[in-house]
Structure formats: C-alpha cells, structure tokens
Amino acid sequence: MKAKSNIDKRNRILLGLEKSYAKMLDFKKQKKSEVVVLRGGKIIKLKPE
C-alpha cells in the first residue's frame, strides 16, 4: 500500500512541475525574455516563440 501512495505522490509532483513549466514558458513569451537551459553540458539561451 505504501508503494502505491509513493507513486501517487510522485505523479502529483510531476504533474505540478509540468504545469509550472508551462506557466513559466507563457510568462517568458509575454515578456519576450529568454529561457536558459542546460543542453549537453552547455548553457543555452532560447527565445520562446
């Protein structure tokens, strides 16, 4: 039973992170500012479109 509870919590956390990321991208689009990401060990600045 505890394993199922942990899976439920994990799924809820992941869902919240996905929503937060989408909200952040919308904000960055509105403000026309760059999104900074780490890709292949390098820091890259992207313009959300």
Image (cartoon, helix red, strand yellow):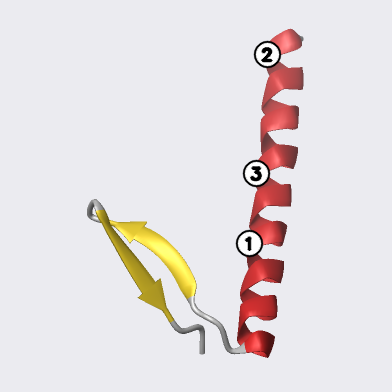
Amino acid carrying mark 1 in the image: Tyr
Q: CA distance from mark 3 to mark 1?
A: 11 Å
Residue placed under numbered mark 2 in the picture: 3
In which quadrant is the N terminus drawn?
top right
* Residue 12, quarter of the rendered image: top right
Q: Is residue 15 above or below residue 2?
A: below
Proximity of marks 3 and 1: CB atoms separated by less than 8 Å: no
Label 1, secondary structure: give it.
helix
Residue 37 on image: x %, y % = 41, 62
Residue placed under numbered mark 3 in the picture: 14
Residue at point 38%, 73% (across, down): 45
Q: Is tag 1's residue or tag 2's residue first in the polypeptide sequence?
A: 2
Residue placed under numbered mark 1 in the picture: 21
Label 3, secondary structure: give it.
helix
Q: Depth check: 31 or 22 in front?
A: 31
Q: CA distance from mark 2 to mark 3?
A: 16 Å
Residue 19 on image: x %, y % = 71, 60
- How many numbered circles does the render carry? 3
Residue 32 located left or right of residue 20? left
Proximity of marks 1 and 2: CB atoms separated by less than 8 Å: no
Q: CA distance from mark 1 to mark 2?
A: 27 Å
Amino acid carrying mark 2 in the image: Ala
- Which of label 2 and label 3 is nearer to you? 3
Q: Is residue 42 above or below residue 31?
A: above
* Residue 20, quarter of the rendered image: bottom right
